[in-house]
Amino acid sequence: MVGFMKRKIRFGIIGCGVIADFHANAIMELQDEAILVGVTDVVYDAAEKFSKRHGIRVFATLEE
């Protein structure tokens, strides 16, 4: 299809436990199809560190 733009799937990670980095890396490997946009965690400092490591936005709450 001429002029067809493929939209990327936007992901956010909820919780910065041990497996979160694996998920973030997997999403980032799919850069043509997906984008990691943000993270949240009940421990804000953990989410902030995670966001800096992956260059994404940190959200204080799910509602944000």
Image (cartoon, rainbow, N blue to C red):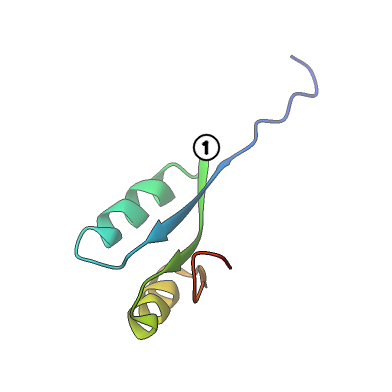
**Residue under the point 72% across and 30% down:** 5
Using the image, determine if residue 6 lies above or below residue 29.
above
Residue 45 lies, in percent from the top left, at 36, 85
**Residue under the point 51% across and 72% down:** 59
Residue 52 lies, in percent from the top left, at 43, 77
- Front position in the image: 46 or 63: 63
- Front position in the image: 28 or 13: 13
- Regarding mark 1 in the picture, which secondary structure is present there? loop
Side of 63 where 46 appears, left or right? left
- Work out which residue is located at the far front of the displayed protein and give it: 63
- Work out which residue is located at the far bottom of the displayed protein and give it: 45
- Work out which residue is located at the far left of the displayed protein and give it: 18
Quadrant in which the N terminus is drawn: top right
- Work out which residue is located at the far top of the displayed protein and give it: 1
Q: How many marks?
A: 1
Instruction: Please tell me how crowded label 1 is: few (under 14), some (14-19), or many (20+) other residues with Cα within 10 Å.
Output: few
Q: Amino acid at mark 1?
A: Glu
Side of 2 where 11 appears, left or right? left
Q: Which residue is mark 1?
A: 33
Q: Quadrant of residue 43?
A: bottom left
Side of 15 where 19 appears, left or right? left
Residue 16 lies, in percent from the top left, at 30, 68
Side of 59 where 44 appears, left or right? left
Q: Quadrant of residue 64?
A: bottom right
**Residue under the point 44% across and 73% down:** 51
Residue 23 lies, in percent from the top left, at 31, 52
Using the image, determine if residue 40 lies above or below residue 26.
below
